[in-house]
Image (cartoon, rainbow, N blue to C red):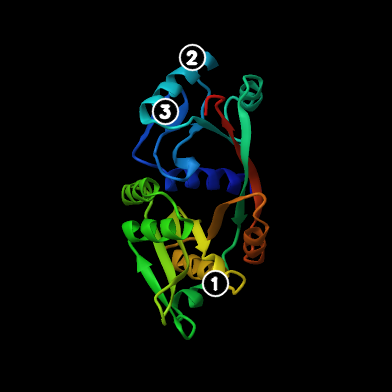
Amino acid sequence: MLETLAARAEDAGLNAAAPREQRWIDGWLVRYSPGKAKRARCINAVADGRLPLDERLALAAAVYRDAGLPMFVRITPFTRPATLDAELAARGWARIDDTRVMVAPELDPAWRTDAAAAAPEGFTWNILDSAAFAATVGALRASPMEQREAHAKRLAGAPVPHTALALLREVDGAVLACGQVAVEAGFAGLYDVFTAPEARGQGHAARLCRRLLGLAMGQGATVGYLQVEADNTPARTIYGRLGFADAFAYHYRQAPEA
């Protein structure tokens, strides 16, 4: 059961993060969006190819060189061929960004109520379009303007619709937390959940996630998934309390010249 959910979560995640800047190279889904998220600017080796590995790497390297981006390969339990990680390591590719995909097999029906509830006293919820959300989360992260613009462009053209929210403090309009959810075929993916440093430890992230997942349930979602860095213990603790558990791990291989 968990293996099936993990595979479907991987498919949903690939779809939700799809940028316009992508092409196929012999079984590799090569993405080259200039945004912050590596999942939108990396190689996903999703099928066995026919060309020798070095030839495929050379073809992909040309894409990243033309785009002015470093070259990464995302390694998951579904990567083909299964030996790719070891072959890249033998060629001197560094392993970086250990990440976990977490899955909640059942969403809590009570979250539907959370989705309709008013914000706590002194706070307000704002629904954001793709441009406003990219600007909001980019400001919280202090991301370069180029990354914010690329994020907005990717969200605007995404094949899977996203719903984005921000929790604001009424007295000064400060954004305390924001995030978004993408819903496809019953799977709700949480993305870009971020709490302002000065507002952490106050329950805002959990409140935001419950509301986003409740909204997703209204769109037919029954299963939740998300991606989080393996060493982000505070976030993983929050997600665990919401019923999420590790489904699989992935990491990236970084080309030596990167």
Image quadrant where residue 104 sits:
bottom right
Query: Mark 2 — residue?
Result: 55
Picture residue at 48% right of the left edge, 86% below the top: 121
Depth check: 23 or 11 in front?
A: 23
Amino acid type for the residue under numbered disc 1: His
Q: Residue 251 carries which label?
A: none
Q: Residue furthest bottom?
A: 121
Picture residue at 44% right of the left edge, 68% below the top: 215
Amino acid type for the residue under numbered disc 3: Tyr
**Mark 1 or 2, nearer chain start:** 2
Secondary element at tag 1:
helix
Depth check: 157 or 147 in front?
A: 147
Query: Mark 3 — residue?
Result: 64
Q: How many labels does the image show?
A: 3
How crowded pointer 3 is (Cα within 10 Å; few <14, some 14-19, many 20+) is rated as: some
Depth check: 109 or 37 in front?
A: 37
Query: Mark 1 — residue?
Result: 204
Where is residue 202 shown, x and y percent of the image? 59, 74
Where is residue 139 shown, x and y percent of the image? 42, 59
Amino acid type for the residue under numbered disc 2: Glu
Where is residue 193 shown, x and y percent of the image? 51, 60
